[in-house]
Image (cartoon, rainbow, N blue to C red):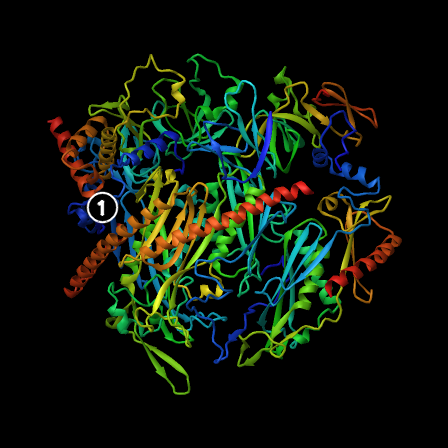
């Protein structure tokens, strides 16, 4: 039996270990954290669209024409950051997106969540946010047809739909007055998750895309929840017209998940975790690149930090190539 | 200070015990165990009786010579506020293990200490595999064990498991099987034990001592053991529900001790069956 | 924060994956994750280590040596010539949802008790005199196993005694579980071994005043520190998780939720079993139990060898740094 | 026993269910007939047994059963410093533990109110009646005395805990054997050899108070239930406990709960207690 | 036809699954039937069954626990506009040693005009109510319903302390003062 015992390294494995002692180029170092390959490293001037990293208390701008957004406050007519993160600007609105934070959602987000509690007429769902999201009984498709009306008996058998521990994919529908998210699964692509395994990454790393449901070419389905929860599962042919509504709430995995399927799922999961380890944005293209890069390593090596870094680097290079 | 109990002096301690020089303390000897004339594989005679706590749903009392343990089972009943967590489709088995203050050589405190809390956990892990918890969703079965006299810790734990299992069955709780438990101690026994007690392996020449497994060791024997094992076992289903071993032993000794424990558990099982069947016939005559 | 919940579909996926020998993260049943270890990172302690298992579990183990009175059993008089080891494990409530509020109390207690049982003599109160180690019969034994039987720890408690009947060294081993990613117990014992190997205590000189009165002198020369006697005999743990009809090592948090029964096997470098403990609410057949003990033993021995190699390598690096007049490079809390 | 059914409404229940729903009503039906549900007359006591030396790890011990109530008392001796006010007096510390094992009425954790009341009552009887001359427990004046922890564990609770616990404490006290100690520079040592007449001693009790308890079932009629069990305690208004020593001298009268009682009633309680304690004393001997 | 046979204890093997149907007090495991309680083994042959049913009649009855559809008798402890909190004391005629908590929500009080139900006009603290378990409810309480004729208050005392007798399905009268109090009454069976 072989166990790898390592010495710890400083953040950033490859010789960047010394950078923490070298405070001259902090920005550069932080931009690494944000996925060094997607964004050009650059000056502090945010106006040209490059990355601007700030820490709490740091002045973002003294220009009074800008409006204060999330993560900022105004002090002595200066706009100051209240979190450590990246400055974002939309026209005159300046906000700071924190680097390491819980998920803060927007309406329309696809999220993966875990049911934590069943109460009257609603489920509480952990979505990696500041508080549990709410899934109302009225926000799900009831078995027996999309148009079926909610009945009183449904209230008494909520656990037959979702019970504590179940994983669901849902869409963020609205905010409650206290800031809690209201979810819905009123589409056949949403609902209970089966046939695979769950991983979690920092929410900021999941790139907002047109679709968050991907059937990758190697025969693995991936749902990239914008809250950082990701579901990697065996490929199931999707034909939305033919889905049996009774099946939506089934807890049964499909019978024929082969060892090869499992290996592919594990490989994809590890690739995503590799990207997350190297703080790179996660989308279907980069996952595919990482997967291809991973094929030169045996599956069980993919949990090694070193191998993960190599895969992520290679995937990053492929992305750069693609951009030309 | 504990205001809810009658207060005694603080800093009370047990007096020092001094043994006269000429009077030997007991030490392990070949073919001579501490209490009675037992062979290494022999367990102490068991007295096991159900139904001594009439307010409980089920209860049992076990006695192995000086070891005396009572157990009461309550439920399935509603969880108390302190036990309440999220909804569970399965029932919960809650065990509490307590030594009476006078049950050990050193006086115990009223409040449960770390050891008692751990033994509580061991007890519930040993019994849970046998209880059909899926049949009483969101309820709790409380198992309370009080040791009145402790004559060997490992044996005491084993007896508590046996006793609690019988009490559960007596409470009419659906179970897959009874859980019998037995302890074994790893002893180094000098071959020619005459005169000086030779407890130290190294002072005895190699080959002059022998490793033995003494089942169901009492306190005096336990003081001389190299280690001990407690094994809980469902005899009918042939499943080990708990194993707890401490001290150091070679792999072969462990295997042997596991087998010896299982053998002893089968003997204990017969006693358990007998006492439960007796509770039926007694019920009939009343 | 991860919840301690799992869905039936995940449970089934993990169960069948274990059966197929493909775990969710691609490991096989007997594969450990990467473990990173660093010793000597807390200067206020006598010895310390930080252990991280890739994927979450993160802990700090410290050893503090203090001088205190010996603990004598009033009934038997045992313990007059022995030092003590006192273990305490604390889980940081923020590391896992199950540890919030008072939730960690039971876990803390269970872990502290397991550790104390494995490390200290427990019930085995057989006297071990200081002549043991040098006695000829000890070295003549084929396996060269340590002959002192003062407990499974292997740590020679009698060497920690300063004035028999009065004062001794008390080793406080405190572990702080900073993050939970499964397999706490194995990491705990690895960290303890590393921390004890890192521990150095001052030499003491016994002075006799003739009339049966003793005193001692602490030698404060840092060059003249001693290591803990018998530390190489300390056991470590291998925890096997029974899932379905199979068992796995180094379970992840989700795998731990699927585990029916868990068996922790403490092993020393001679392959002797120094403790067994089943936990969780499942059971197993006796044949499986024996098989698990056997494989735990084999794995544990291999694990110790590799762990020791790591600890020695780090000690060697640190030494060479010191020889060059530089402080050893430690990342401590800046580590990845 | 099962002949009682609900008649107050048209809903019928089994006797057990009826007792569960309307316990007071259930009892009233029996008491009006002059009997109790367990078949006793109102003045009847439950069978009582006493065993001595039941726990060898204790210096003195006893087990007492009063009907369904079972208690074990173990007395453990430790060495402590005497108080400044009484430098040659030891301690006897009685505590009653009503654990959740003995009845579902008790919760885990600190002692319930009832346990505190019983412990305190026994403590007061021991102190006020001067049961043991505490100078017997002196080892070295001003330095070391014996502290006797008299802990009563209730194994099974079925009412009337005070009578059972006091009887157990008294029996255990007569059962105590202490090794003769030697005192040397703050260390108290006893011999580890087997107990003999020479190396040990027992306590001399000045008197042995024993108690008898009656439950007040209803006030206008002053119906008394002797030796109430747990169900009877729950439907009663209060309790009267009479404590007498072997010379039938009164050591205490204790009334708890609501419900008033006339002096004549107390007088009759004392008379009946005399008979009962005589019986118990024969068990003690 | 039932024949009583020997006394058994949990774990005792009773027979082969091919010979018997597993009845109460038994379970099947790897082709065999085992006893799961202490009691007397019984073999019941009913017409139409291909195999006789093997069951174990409990000697020491487990305390009753509420199950879905069980008829329970409970005592009202608290009321609020949304629901009445009750202590379940008897399940299917068998007393349970400890109370279980239940709630009767306003929509479960009666079958018709549910939105007009006022809890305070249906139940008062102290009432003894017969109800049916409709759900295991949440972590704390079982959900109960009285939406059947034979379910509702079966015993109550008036504000004056007199016993109430039903005079209609939603009114009860005090025997002492003749005051009429509103209740959801159970129809005597």
* Front-most of residues E104 and E83: E104
Residue drawn at x 27%, y 62% as measured from the top left: C232
Q: Residue E53: where, in percent of width, then height? A: 53, 27
Q: Residue D91: where, in percent of width, then height? A: 64, 69
Q: Chain of mark 1?
A: A
The answer to whether residue B103 of the structure is visible from this angle is: yes
* Front-most of residues D45 and A107: D45
Q: Quadrant of the N terminus of chain C?
A: top left
In the figure, residue A193 lies in which quadrant? top left
Number of numbered labels in the structure image: 1
Q: Residue B22: where, in percent of width, then height? A: 48, 80
* Front-most of residues C6 and A253: A253
Q: Which SS class for mark 1?
A: loop
Is A6 on the left-hand or right-hand side of B19?
Answer: left
The answer to whether residue B77 of the structure is visible from this angle is: no
In the figure, residue D33 lies in which quadrant? top right
Residue drawn at x 17%, y 29% as measured from the top left: A289
Is C246 above or below relative to C85? above
Q: Residue E96: where, in percent of width, then height? A: 63, 36
Is C208 above or below relative to B2? below
Residue extending farthest bottom: C210
Q: What residue is disc 1 on?
A: A11
How many other residues sit within 10 Å of disc 1, few (<14), some (14-19) or many (≥20)? some
Residue drawn at x 50%, y 79% as measured from the top left: B20
Is C319 above or below relative to A285? below
């Amino acid at each position: 039996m072989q166990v790898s015992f390592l010495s710890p390294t400083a953040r950033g494995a490859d010789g960047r270990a010394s950078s923490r002692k070298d405070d001259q180029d902090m920005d550069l170092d932080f931009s690494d954290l944000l996925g060094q390959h997607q964004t050009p490293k650059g000056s502090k001037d945010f106006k040209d669209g490059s990355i601007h990293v700030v820490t709490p208390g740091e002045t973002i701008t003294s220009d009074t024409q800008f409006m204060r957004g999330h993560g900022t406050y105004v002090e002595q007519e200066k706009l100051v950051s209240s979190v450590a993160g990246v400055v974002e600007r939309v026209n005159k609105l300046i906000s700071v997106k924190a680097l390491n934070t819980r998920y803060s959602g927007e309406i329309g987000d696809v999220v993966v969540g875990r049911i934590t509690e069943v109460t009257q007429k609603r489920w509480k769902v952990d979505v990696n946010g500041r508080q549990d999201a709410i899934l109302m009984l009225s926000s799900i498709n009831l078995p027996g047809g999309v148009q079926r009306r909610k009945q009183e008996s449904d209230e008494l058998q909520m656990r037959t739909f979702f019970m504590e521990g179940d994983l669901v994919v849902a869409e963020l529908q609205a905010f409650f007055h206290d800031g809690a998210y209201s979810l819905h699964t009123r589409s056949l692509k949403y609902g209970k998750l089966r046939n695979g395994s769950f991983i979690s990454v920092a929410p900021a790393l999941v790139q907002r895309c047109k679709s968050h449901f991907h059937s990758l070419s190697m025969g693995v389905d991936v749902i990239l929840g914008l809250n950082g929860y990701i579901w990697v599962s065996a490929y199931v042919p999707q034909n939305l017209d033919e889905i049996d509504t009774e099946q939506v709430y089934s807890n049964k995995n499909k019978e024929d998940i082969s060892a090869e399927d499992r290996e592919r799922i594990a490989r994809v999961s590890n690739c995503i975790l590799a990207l997350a380890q190297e703080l790179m944005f996660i989308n279907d293209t980069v996952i595919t690149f990482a997967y291809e890069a991973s094929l030169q390593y045996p599956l069980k090596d993919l949990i090694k930090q070193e191998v993960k870094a190599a895969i992520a680097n290679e995937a990053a290079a492929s992305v750069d190539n693609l951009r030309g | 200070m504990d205001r809810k109990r009658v207060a005694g002096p603080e800093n009370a301690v047990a007096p020092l015990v001094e043994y006269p020089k000429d009077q030997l303390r007991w030490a392990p000897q070949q073919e001579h165990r501490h209490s009675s004339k037992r062979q290494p594989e022999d367990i102490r005679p068991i007295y096991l009786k159900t139904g001594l706590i009439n307010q409980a749903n089920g209860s049992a009392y076990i006695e192995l010579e000086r070891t005396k343990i009572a157990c009461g089972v309550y439920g399935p009943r509603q969880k108390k506020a302190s036990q309440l967590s999220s909804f569970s489709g399965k029932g919960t088995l809650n065990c509490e293990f307590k030594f009476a203050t006078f049950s050990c050589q050193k006086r115990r405190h009223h409040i449960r200490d770390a050891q008692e809390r751990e033994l509580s956990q061991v007890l519930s892990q040993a019994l849970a595999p046998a209880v059909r918890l899926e049949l009483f969703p969101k309820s709790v079965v409380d198992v309370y064990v009080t040791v009145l006299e402790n004559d060997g810790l490992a044996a005491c734990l084993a007896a508590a498991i046996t006793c609690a299992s019988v009490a559960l069955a007596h409470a009419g709780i659906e179970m897959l099987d009874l859980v019998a438990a037995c302890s074994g101690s790893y002893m180094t026994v000098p071959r020619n034990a005459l005169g000086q007690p030779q407890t130290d392996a190294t002072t005895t020449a190699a080959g002059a001592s022998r490793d033995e497994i003494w089942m169901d060791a009492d306190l005096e024997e336990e003081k001389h053991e190299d280690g001990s094992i407690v094994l809980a076992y469902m005899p009918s289903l042939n499943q080990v529900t708990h194993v707890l071993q401490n001290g150091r032993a070679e792999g072969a000794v462990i295997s042997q001790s596991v087998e010896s424990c299982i053998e002893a558990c089968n003997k204990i099982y017969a006693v358990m069956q007998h006492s439960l069947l007796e509770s039926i016939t007694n019920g009939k005559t009343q | 924060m991860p919840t301690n919940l799992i869905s039936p579909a995940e449970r089934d996926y993990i169960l069948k994956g274990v059966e197929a020998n493909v775990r969710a993260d691609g490991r096989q049943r007997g594969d450990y994750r990467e473990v990173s270890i660093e010793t000597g990172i807390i200067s206020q302690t006598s010895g310390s280590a930080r252990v991280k298992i890739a994927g979450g579990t993160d802990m700090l183990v410290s050893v503090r040596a203090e001088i205190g009175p010996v603990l004598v059993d009033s009934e038997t008089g045992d313990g007059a010539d022995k030092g003590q080891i006192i273990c305490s494990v604390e889980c940081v409530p923020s590391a896992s949802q199950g540890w919030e509020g008072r939730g960690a109390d039971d876990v803390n207690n269970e872990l502290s008790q397991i550790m104390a049982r494995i490390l200290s003599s427990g019930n085995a109160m057989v006297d071990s005199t200081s002549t043991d180690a040098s006695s000829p019969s000890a070295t003549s034994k084929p396996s060269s196993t340590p002959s002192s039987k003062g407990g499974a720890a292997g740590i020679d408690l009698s060497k920690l005694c300063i004035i028999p009947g009065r004062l001794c060294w008390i080793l406080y081993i405190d572990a702080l579980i900073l993050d939970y990613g499964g397999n706490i117990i194995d990491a705990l014992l690895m960290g303890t071994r590393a921390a004890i190997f890192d521990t150095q205590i001052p030499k003491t000189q016994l002075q006799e005043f003739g009339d049966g009165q003793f005193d001692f002198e602490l030698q404060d020369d840092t060059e003249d520190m001693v290591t803990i006697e018998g530390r190489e005999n300390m056991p470590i743990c291998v925890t096997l998780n029974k899932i379905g009809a199979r068992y796995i090592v180094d379970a992840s948090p989700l795998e731990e939720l699927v585990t029916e029964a868990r068996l922790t096997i403490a092993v020393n470098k001679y392959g002797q079993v120094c403790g067994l403990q089943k936990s969780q609410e499942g059971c197993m057949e006796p044949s499986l139990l024996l098989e698990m003990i056997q494989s735990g033993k084999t794995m544990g021995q291999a694990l110790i060898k590799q762990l020791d190699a790591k600890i020695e390598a780090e000690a060697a690096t640190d030494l060479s740094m010191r020889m060059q007049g530089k402080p050893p490079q430690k990342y401590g809390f800046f580590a990845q | 026993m099962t002949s009682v059914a609900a008649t107050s409404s048209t809903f019928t229940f089994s006797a057990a269910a009826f007792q569960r729903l309307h316990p007071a009503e259930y009892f009233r039906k029996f008491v009006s007939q002059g009997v109790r549900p367990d078949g006793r007359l109102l003045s009847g006591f439950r069978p009582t047994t006493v065993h001595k030396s039941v726990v060898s790890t204790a210096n003195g011990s006893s087990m007492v059963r009063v009907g369904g109530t079972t208690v074990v008392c173990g007395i453990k001796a430790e060495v402590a410093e005497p108080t400044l006010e009484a430098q040659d007096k030891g301690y006897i510390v009685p505590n009653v533990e009503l654990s959740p094992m003995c009845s579902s009425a008790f919760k885990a954790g600190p002692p319930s109110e009832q346990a505190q009341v019983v412990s305190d009552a026994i403590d007061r009887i021991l102190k006020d009646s001067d049961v043991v001359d505490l100078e017997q427990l002196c080892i070295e004046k001003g330095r070391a005395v014996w502290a006797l922890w008299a802990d009563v564990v209730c194994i099974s609770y079925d009412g009337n805990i005070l009578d059972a616990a006091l009887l157990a404490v008294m029996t255990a006290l007569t059962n105590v054997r202490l090794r003769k100690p030697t005192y040397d520079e703050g260390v108290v040592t006893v011999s580890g050899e087997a107990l003999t007449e020479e190396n040990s001693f027992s306590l001399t009790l000045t008197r042995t108070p024993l108690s008898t308890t009656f439950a007040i079932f209803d006030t206008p009629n002053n119906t008394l239930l002797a030796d109430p069990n747990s169900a009877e305690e729950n439907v009663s208004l209060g309790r009267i406990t009479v404590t007498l020593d072997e010379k039938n001298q009164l050591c205490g009268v204790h009334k708890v709960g609501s419900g008033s009682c006339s002096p004549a009633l107390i007088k009759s309680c004392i008379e009946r207690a005399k008979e009962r304690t005589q019986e118990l004393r024969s068990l003690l001997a | 036809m039932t024949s009583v046979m020997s006394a058994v204890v949990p774990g005792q093997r009773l027979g082969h699954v091919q010979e018997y149907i597993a009845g109460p007090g038994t379970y099947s495991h790897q082709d065999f039937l085992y006893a799961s309680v202490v009691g007397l083994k019984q073999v019941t042959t009913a017409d139409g069954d291909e195999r006789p049913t093997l069951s174990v009649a409990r000697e020491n009855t487990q305390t009753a626990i509420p199950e879905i559809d069980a008829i329970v008798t409970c005592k009202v402890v608290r009321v609020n506009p949304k629901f009445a909190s009750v202590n379940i004391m008897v399940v299917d005629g068998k007393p349970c040693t400890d109370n279980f908590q239940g709630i009767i929500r306003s929509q479960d009080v009666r079958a018709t005009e549910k939105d007009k139900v006022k809890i305070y006009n249906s139940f008062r603290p102290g009432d003894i109510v017969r109800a049916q378990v409709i759900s295991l409810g949440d972590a704390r309480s079982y959900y109960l319903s009285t939406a059947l004729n034979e379910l509702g208050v079966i015993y109550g005392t008036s504000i004056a302390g007199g016993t109430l007798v039903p005079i209609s399905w939603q009114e009860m009268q005090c025997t002492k003062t003749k005051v009429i109090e509103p209740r959801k009454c159970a129809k005597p069976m």
